[in-house]
Image (tube, grey):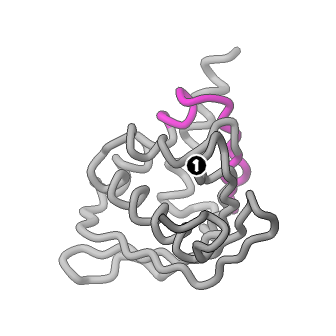
Amino acid sequence: MADQATIAASDIAEAILEVTGDALMSGNFDAFSAVFHAPQTMVTMAGPVYMENLEDMRRAFDEMHQYLKGMGVTEMIRACVASEYTSPTRIESTHVTELLQNGKRLNEPYPVFSILEKVNGGWKVTRGEYALEESNGQALAISRADASHRIKST
């Protein structure tokens, strides 16, 4: 078995992209949350969304899954374009996401910057920055999750 230090940063990033993409498309929160760490912040041009725990993450996940279903997305293509270790337990990675419906592009591809960190022996996403305009449905889906949390807290 290969030592983690010998595994390319891009291989780790691509494996996480596969897990999270499949989970978002199928609605499998358990698979998604296995490679995401809470607390964490997701950022879009609509602003930051801070997720303190799995309940917050679940809300954001459910909003995103419903958004993808509502748009009729049949395929999510994500390709790692850059990935590097910044320490033995931290990777900074950029990937591009494209959403398709039966082979037809539904959006312009957009970049995502992620920080992956080794937590309790496994690699997890600890931060994501999505280059999505404030009015983009995906950005709004994530933001609504945060807004609903703030409403419940008051």
In magenta stretch: residue 43? yes
Relative vertical location of residue 73 with respect to residue 52 in this rendering, above or below: below
Residue 150: image quadrant is top right
Work out which quarter of the rendered image holds the C terminus and state it: top right
Q: Amino acid at mark 1?
A: Gly
Number of residues whose C-alpha sits closer than 10 Å to that of mark 1, classed few (under 14), some (14–19) or many (20 or more): few
Tell me if 30 is positioned left or right of 140 in this view: left
- In depth, the one of 124 and 25 nearer the eye is 124
> Residue at label 1?
122
Relative vertical location of residue 130 with respect to residue 126 in this rendering, above or below: below
Residue drawn at (48%, 34%) of the image: 58
Residue 11: horizontal and vertical position, in percent?
52, 74
Which residue, as the protein is rendered here, is positioned at the far right?
87
Q: Which residues are drawn in magenta?
A: 41-59
Number of marks in the image? 1
Which residue, as the protein is rendered here, is positioned at the far front?
1
Residue drawn at (60%, 18%) of the image: 152
Residue 105: horizontal and vertical position, in percent?
33, 82
Residue 124: horizontal and vertical position, in percent?
59, 51
Residue drawn at (58%, 49%) of the image: 122
Which residue, as the protein is rendered here, is positioned at the far left?
102
Callout 1: helix, strand or loop?
Answer: strand
Relative vertical location of residue 132 with respect to residue 111 in this rendering, above or below: above
Tell me if 3 is positioned left or right of 100 in this view: right
In magenta stretch: residue 135? no
- In depth, the one of 1 and 47 nearer the eye is 1
Residue 144: horizontal and vertical position, in percent?
55, 41
Residue 20: image quadrant is bottom left
Relative vertical location of residue 63 with respect to residue 56 in this rendering, above or below: below
Residue drawn at (61%, 63%) of the image: 4
